[in-house]
Image: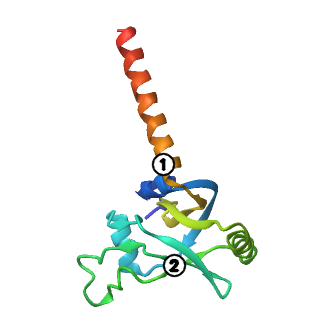
Amino acid sequence: MPKQRGVKPVAQNKKAYHDYFIEEKYEAGIELFGTEVKSIRAGNVNLKDSFCTVKDGELFAHGMHISPYEKGNIFNRDPMRPKRLLMHRREIAKLHAKIQQDGLTLVPLSLYLKDSLVKVELGLARGKKLYDKRDAAAKRDADREIDRTMKEKYR
């Protein structure tokens, strides 16, 4: 069977864009078991409350829920287990330094299939305050209203 080409998005973490300002984005591989990959291909994954930590020079994703594969029986793993992310050591060290110094957080933004491999897009994020969230909602509503009036005007 030939290798699949291209990028196929599987899951998005829209809550991360609501709760954080995303400053930089990175791509990482993820260490999974066979039934987890099959479950991801079926789209049974949730990134909503996930975050990443660095421990002993390794990067881990916590809170990423991968539902058990229906036909997996004894080979299914714990859906909430910490998953090791695969990046170069120097990239992990650089991220760890930024997280420690600047008070930033590393958040999974999306999970996708890239040439038949499962990849995670990570975002280096700074937390939003409540007033930032209100400003973003007001701007979004204003843009929506402008689009609506422009559409009516040019009909």
* Horizontal and vertical percent position of residue 4: 47, 58
- Amino acid bearing label 1: Lys
76 to 96, vertically: above or below: below
Residue 60 found in image quarter: bottom right
Secondary structure under tag 2 reads loop
Residue position marked by numbered label 2 in the rendering? 31
Mark before the other along the chain sequence, 2 or 1: 2
Residue 104 sits in quarter: bottom right
On the image, the x and y values in percent for residue 112 come to 47, 60
Q: Please identify, in this view, whether the residue under mark 2 or under mark 1 is nearer the observer.
A: 1
Observer-nearest of 36 and 51: 51
- Please identify the quadrant where the C terminus is shown: top left
State the CA–CA distance, disc 2 to disc 1.
34 Å
Residues tagged 2 and 1 counted as in contact (Cβ below 8 A): no
Q: How are the residues colored?
A: rainbow
- Circle 1: element type: helix
Look at label 2 and name its amino acid.
Glu
Percent position of residue 68, x then y:
29, 78
Q: Residue 26 occupies which quadrant of the picture?
A: bottom right
Q: Which mark is residue 133?
A: 1
Q: Residue at x 46, y 29 (%)?
A: 143
Measuring 76% from the left and 74% from the top, which residue is drawn there?
90
State which quarter of the image contains the N terminus. bottom left
